[in-house]
Amino acid sequence: MLTDEIALDFEHAYRGVAGAGEAELDREVLSDLKTIDEIFDGMSGQDQADRWSDEAVASDPGWAETRALARRVLQVRVGDWRLPMPKLREWP
């Protein structure tokens, strides 16, 4: 499921910067990344499986909050939100 891959990719990246990259990221960005991690943790488990469907990505409040936080992180890191979105690709 693509949603699982999103969370796993985030977790790997977050774990990498949470310790090693703290000096390079400002506190607001780290706080937002931590909150995203906490949201994903709260959405984990068999009883939360319906929150990981493709439909839930568009309607679930946890996903909406995650998108808002991710958008804010991107704005801090790369500036003006009107920049083109980066190309996304699925891993084999």
Image: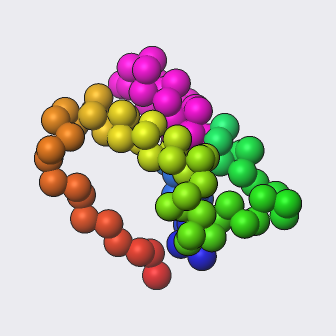
At x 39%, y 20%, the residue is: 26
> Which quadrant of the structure image shows residue 85?
bottom left
- The one nearer the camera, 57 or 92, is 57
Residue sitting farthest toward the front: 59
List the single residue furthest toward the bottom.
92
- Chief secondary structure of the magenta span? helix
Question: Number of marks in the image?
Answer: 0
* Above-or-below relation of 39 to 91: above
Q: Residue at x 36, y 41 (%)?
A: 71
Closer to us: 2 or 59: 59
Q: Position of residue 18 (x, y in %)?
A: 54, 32
Up/down of 59 relative to 11, above or below: below
Residue 30: in magenta span? yes
Q: Is residue 41 visible?
A: yes
Residue extending farthest right: 47
Q: Quadrant of residue 45?
A: bottom right
Task: Decide which of 54, 17 is in the foreground and name it.
Answer: 54
For image coordinates 85% across by 60% down, the residue present is: 47
Residue sitting at x 58%, y 33%: 35
Q: Position of residue 82 (x, y in %)?
A: 15, 44
Quarter in which the N terminus is drawn = bottom right
Q: Is residue 15 visible?
A: no
Expressed as whole percent of the image width and height from the top left, the position of residue 76 reads 29, 29
Residue 89, placed above or below residue 77 = below
Residue 61 place in picture, x, y as percent = 59, 47
From this view, report whether residue 16 is shown above or below residue 32.
below
Q: In this picture, which residue range is highlighted in magenta?
A: 14-37
